Each structure stands twice: as C-alpha cells, then as structure tokens.
Amino acid sequence: MLVEKYKIDQFNHEILNDHKRKFEFVASSVKNVEEILQKLVDFQIAIPSWALGTGGTRFGRFAGGGEPRSLEEKIEDIGLLHKLNNCSGAISLHIPWDIPTNSNNIKALAAQHGIRFDAMNSNTFQDQAGQEWSYKYGSMQHIDKGVRRQAIEHNIEVIKYGIELGSESLTVWLADGSNFPGQLNMRKAFQNTLESLQEVYAELPDNWKMFVEYKAFEPNFYSTTVGDWGQSFLYASKLGPKAYTLVDLGHHLPNANIEQIVALLLMEEKLGGFHFNDSKYSDDDLTVGSINPYQLFLIFKELVEGMDARGMNHASDLGWMIDASHNVKDPLEDLLQSVEAIMIAYAQALLVDAKELEAAQLANDVVRAQEILQGAYRTDVRPLIAEARLRGGAALEPLNLYRQLKVRENLIKERGLKTVATGL
Ligand SMILES: [Mn+2]
C-alpha cells in the first residue's frame, strides 16, 4: 500500500498549530536545538524483515492478517513506515528467508522507497529442507567438520547476496551451545567456532563489517558458545579489525548493566551494532521502551558520549536495528512505537550537557550528576521528534495517521487474512 504525500501534508496541516505551540515551548529551553534537529533528521533505524509479521512463541502463533508474502512486500511495508516517520530507511535481510530472485529488481524497488540494505543475517539455528548436515548439535562449534563447512559456506553465500544488494555488514548469531553439563568441551567448542568464523571473515570485502552477536541462553540452556559480551569481544578481537560485537538488549542476564558494556566496547572500538527491544525477564523481544525507557536513555547517553569522544557519526558509524517480536500487536504499529521510543531516548541523550556532567563528576557532586541526567530524561522531547519528522517530509503523528488511513485493513484486503511473513 502506498501513502500519497498529499495525505501526509493534509494530516499535518490539521494539527500544525498545536504542534508549533508544543515545539516552541520545548525549543525555548534547548540550547542547540537546530543541531539536535539535524541529528534527529539524519538518524535511521533498520527494520528486520522478520519483524513485519506476527511473531510466535513455542506455544503458538496468532496471525493478524495482511502480512507480507514476499521480499517485495516486506520492502513495501518498510517503505510505508519510512514514509510515515522518515527514520526507518533501511532493511535487514535474513537468508534463506529473503533470498532475492532478482537482486537488481529488489535494489530498484528499495531505492524507490528510499530504503538501503543494512546488515545481512545468516541462519544456522534451524535445518533447511534438503540440507546435507543437521545443526541439532550446533553449527560452527560442531565436532564434525562437515557441519562446520556447511555453516561456513552458508555465511559466505549470505555475504554474496549482500554484495549484490549493496549491504556492508554480516551479523552472525549462533544458537550453538549445550543443554547439559558434559555435553561438549567448552574450549574446543570455542576453538571450532573461532576457526569457522575466521574462514567467513576471510571472505569479507574490505568495506564490510562482521557483527558477532551474543546471547546468554536459549535455545541452549546450559552453555552458549557466544554467551556474553566478553566472549563476543574475544572472538571479535581474534578475528581482526573488521569484526565487532553486536549488542542485543534482550540477550543479557537480568539486571546486567548494559550501558557500561556499551561504554567499554565503544572505548575499545569494538562496538559494531545494536538490536533494540525491551524485556521484563530475558529475551522477551517486547516493544522498545515499553518496560524500561530509563535504561534505554542511559544506554543512549553512553552511546552519544562515547561516539562524540571518538568523533564518530551517530547516524552511520554504528548499525542500528530493531529486533523484536510482536505476538499481540499489529507489527507495523509496534515498529512505529519502537522507532519513536528509540528517537525519544536518542533526543534525551542529546540534551545531556556533557560539560556540566563532567564538572559534576570531577567535583564528586553525585546529586548534581543525577539531576543532569534525570533533567534530560524527564524532558518531553516528543515535539522535537515530530518537528524533525515534519522537516523530513513525514507525518507529525505517524501512528495516528497509520490508523486514520486504515493501513492494516487495506493490507488485509490486498494480501488476505492468512499470510505468513517469517520462516519460523
Ligand atoms: Mn538480535
């Protein structure tokens, strides 16, 4: 479904005065408002192809209807989000679920929607039809060389698809690990995994990055071969300068201090990318910012501080992606909420006065330091985000326009009620 520009303008026009009043109120207390607005206009968050359909749990899946049936329709859905919010201008593909039949056509379609190709994702966590070896006992860590070879070749194939589409990074998430003590030799599992990753790394083009994603547990429940940021950092360091750690917010044990992890990885030039979601317990894959928005803000505060310390470009030097699952919401509405939550946390982090905070830290003024952070966090920055969207030609209130246009109803009419978007 396409949204015509005049419909966005019409919608904005009706609420423009109200928006202006709110924007001017916030803007009057922000020092460098123009600079912040430009950063907000530039910031883009990649949408993974698998987040466009209803997710499931191991107990079941309740489809919502109108889900994209092909890669083309996935790009159209992201194009629609991007049109509404002007900050979803990238798609992250998953192979083999999204193998392009004609890369040139897919590239042209994406360009039409202003979408670029973010990180490519490989899959060695499930067996595909006709596959020679099984990943039941792992992929890159496997005791059998044949399994490892198959996993390596799959990742190299993913890179090739990525090159055709203009992507510049590969994300490797391995489900490898063990379910019971004694099942595997942890040191050998690490070494096999490292050697396998090295073979994939050798095939990376010069301008590519490899992201090594870690996860504390699940699907394996005793050990995970890339289980935490230390292990990922170890692989990335041994692999070389093109390898980085990828932080998925849901992949930590409860109460982990993610902002500290981020700060240190950035310092060591090994933070590559992000998977945003939120959680109450572990890898719940809930809407970004729905459970703990303060933590999200603290993470962004470290990101902004750490990136500025190294003169990095906020918009392009790290990979930003949502990795969530929507069981009970319309996936597109959930994604609009997620992007909004990310933009809010980013804008709040931009409000933190770094010099004032440093002065408070150097004076051991704990109270002042906390006041600075919470002052930024408690500022209602939503009018700033809306203004950035307006300047980018998008909707002041994307979610309200989405509902007004009856997008989901239209997609169901177009695609039907029973469609499946992911390969799970
Ligand atoms: Mn992830």
Image (cartoon, rainbow, N blue to C red):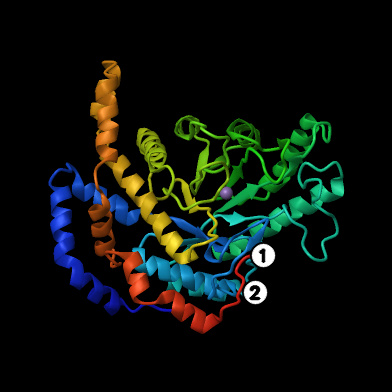
- Side of 393 where 66 appears, left or right: right
Q: Is residue 57 visible?
A: yes
> Tag 1's secondary structure?
loop
Q: Residues within 10 Å of mark 1 (few under 14, many from 20)?
A: few
- Which one is closest to the eye, mark 2 or mark 1? 1
- Is 73 or 158 nearer to us in this picture? 73
Residue 132: x percent and y percent? 85, 59
- Is 303 or 228 nearer to us in this picture? 228
Does label 2 or label 1 sit earlier along the sequence? 2
Asked if residue 6 is positioned above or below residue 287 in the image, the reply reads below
Residue named by callout 1: 423
Q: Amino acid at mark 2?
A: Thr
> Where's the N terminus, which quadrant?
bottom left
Residue 237, located in which quarter of the rendered image? top right
Give the residue furthest to the bottom: 413
Residue drawn at 53 percent across, 54 percent down: 324
Give the residue furthest to the top: 363
Residue drawn at 28 percent across, 55 percent down: 385
Residue named by callout 2: 101
Asked if residue 411 is positioned above or below residue 123 in the image, the reply reads below
Residue drawn at 77 percent across, 58 percent down: 127
Q: Residues within 10 Å of mark 2 (few under 14, many from 20)?
A: few
Residue 138: x percent and y percent? 78, 46
Residue drawn at 44 percent across, 50 percent down: 288
Q: Is mark 2 within 8 Å of ligand 1?
A: no
